[in-house]
Image (cartoon, helix red, strand yellow):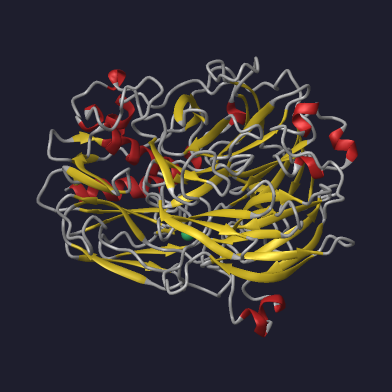
Amino acid sequence: MKYMQVVLLMAGLMIGARDLALADATFTVNDTPGHWFDTGVDIAGTRSLAVIAPGEKVTFNQTVGGPRDVESRHTVTSLVWPKNAPEFATGRGVLDEDSANKDNHEVTLKEPGLYVFVCKLHPYMLGAVIVDDPKTKGLDLGSELKVLGGPNGLIGPFPTYSDLGLRLLRAFFIVTNPSNWKDYTKADGATTYQPTYPHVLVNVGVADAYLDEVILAKGYDGKVIERQHKPKKNGIGEVWVDTQFELTAGKGEQFPGTATVVSATGWNVKRKIALPEQKMNNGHNFWTSHDQKQIYQTEWHGNSLYVINRHNGKLLQEIDLVNGPEVQDPKFNGKKCYDPAHVMTRVDTQQVHVGCNGDNSVVEFNRNPVTGLLDIHRFIPMSKTGETKQTQPHAHWMGFDGKSMVTPNSNTSDSTLYDFNESTIVDKQPTGTLPIATGMMPDSSKYYVSNYLGDTISVMCGPYPKINCAPGTVIKTLNLLDDNADNSGYLTNGRFLDPTTPAASLPGPAGGFSVQTPVSPDGKFVVIGNTLSGTITIIDTKTDTLVRSITCDPGCHGVNFGAKKGGGYYAYVTPKFANRLIVLDYDPNNDGKVDDAVIVGAVVLANDHVSKDDKITGNRGQGGQGVMPVPNVYNGWVQELPIAYKAQLTKAQRNPIGQRHHDDHHDR
Ligand SMILES: [Cu+2]
């Protein structure tokens, strides 16, 4: 009987008739936003959910079509599984791979319940399987679940209908359904943000209930989409945002992504860059050259680094780090760079560094000072000699003087501190599950590692410590789920695990599934985007405690600092599943405290009526990830700016920590 219910659900919302047989399930793993694990069958808006009977097989296909169809490497990693499912290793779910790959995978699932799979490289890629026992009444989600990660490496078992369980289910149905993403073009003062969830009877071992009704009753959604306004106080220059999920005509949905350029003075979208001829694939992150004339652009699901002329948006250079002639040079020993994620420059040499998320290295490029074009110099492994497991570095950070680099190694759950003076790894210490981003103090005294699935921030000893610690080691670990600003303690008080706790009495986690974690140029605060909680969290670096949690948007992700006119900084924040750039004034009265931190405005990124190189066709303004204010005002880089930019900055902004004083370049 209940299969009929699912069939009707599919039939009502299906895109194209397909085989509805509830048998073995196949997911095509690909680069299309929202449909990264694609069954081809729409269930209540998601194409990433399959229902099978116990003992049936699930296949993850990464070899469909030509090689360009699945350009990037991925993993299929068990994120959520039912309490009694057999684990392939203790606390490690039902499936995982040691290396990023383009292989097919399969797993046979017997235990009824909910299984969610994630890619460790691109952790918004989600696919879910419900193994349903035909003898029960509702669809079986399982009474209790386990989740990979958390501060101890594994959360659970916990009741499926707990706050955490329902937050995970809600996240799944938002992430995998683009029509559930928050659209600020609909803000009219009355329209509410209300994602849809499947109207299906489910069994979690307590009274059977409809899933949508259970999630809706929690009151996570339903608030009016606020009208957006511009910040009253100007920034300086412009802000580049990777709207990674925006679709354009010349590339098709398999190659999404535009760079959206926003004016920090007029607060309007100025330009969209899709690079249709190059098929830029999920453009993810940027940095600028010292003269601010070139923008370096990565593609997280592709192979290339792009050099773009900042003034006119035109491509200057593409370096294909997998198939290009540049990597064929025998001196590179066959090394490649899959899924290039983040890019930064070295202050002292102007070299460019790119983290290879689907591999083991950071690639170093030399820059031609006349043309601004790049050449691969070397591949720097982030693993130590003798280690064989890929590190998969995502968002590295560079020291203010160019002498050091830190990486978050998403596959080995640790962080590498690299020293350029000696060309050596200083240390590589465990941090938490799936570290994804880093940020360094402006004097390299400390750095911060954001552990995405760990829901923690590791405070690390930097290369120039001010306390007694060994560079590269952990000083302290902040638990984002627990360390609420009001000490209400989400994880340890246990209330979120108790399905009978009324929603209104729950504080919600301060953070969770944390992403970017930069330190302000003056070193006072760390501002973090959190995907699970949809919040911005702020750490005070004096005490290394969490001092604020501010509501963001679904998929809160990117953060970087830009100069505020007249002094101080804005934190620019980008959500993946909403189409605005958030301008956070974290210290409006400049008293060194963030009690008055406030979102002072935002820019809606859906805007086609601007200069562009391709026609926008969907997911307008969505997928905000990498964000790069120009001019670059971080300590070390700000001193290298052209005079015209320096003239717009205050004395304090030109020298944010009052230590470094070679405004001229004579020491090179
Ligand atoms: Cu992936």
Which of 570 and 442 lies nearest the eye of the viewer?
A: 442
Residue under the point 58% across and 48% down:
245
Which of 665 and 381 lies nearest the eye of the viewer?
A: 665
Which of 253 and 62 lies nearest the eye of the viewer?
A: 62
Residue under the point 78% across and 55% down:
308
Which of 106 and 249 lies nearest the eye of the viewer?
A: 106
Q: Position of residue 225 (x, y in %)?
A: 53, 23
Quadrant for residue 602, please give it: top right
- In the displayed structure, 121 sits above or below 511; it is below
User: Is residue 198 among what the camera can see?
Assistant: yes
Left or right for 499, reference 606: left
In the rendered image, the residue lying farthest to the front is 468
In the rendered image, the residue lying farthest to the left is 135
Label count reads: 0
Left or right for 454, reference 625: left
Q: Position of residue 125 (x, y in %)?
A: 44, 53
- In the displayed structure, 172 sits above or below 554; it is below
Q: Position of residue 388 (x, y in %)?
A: 42, 73
Query: Which image quarter holds the C terminus?
Result: bottom right
Q: Position of residue 335 (x, y in %)?
A: 58, 76
Left or right for 220, reference 652: left
User: Is residue 266 among what the camera can see?
Assistant: no
Residue under the point 28% across and 30% down:
213
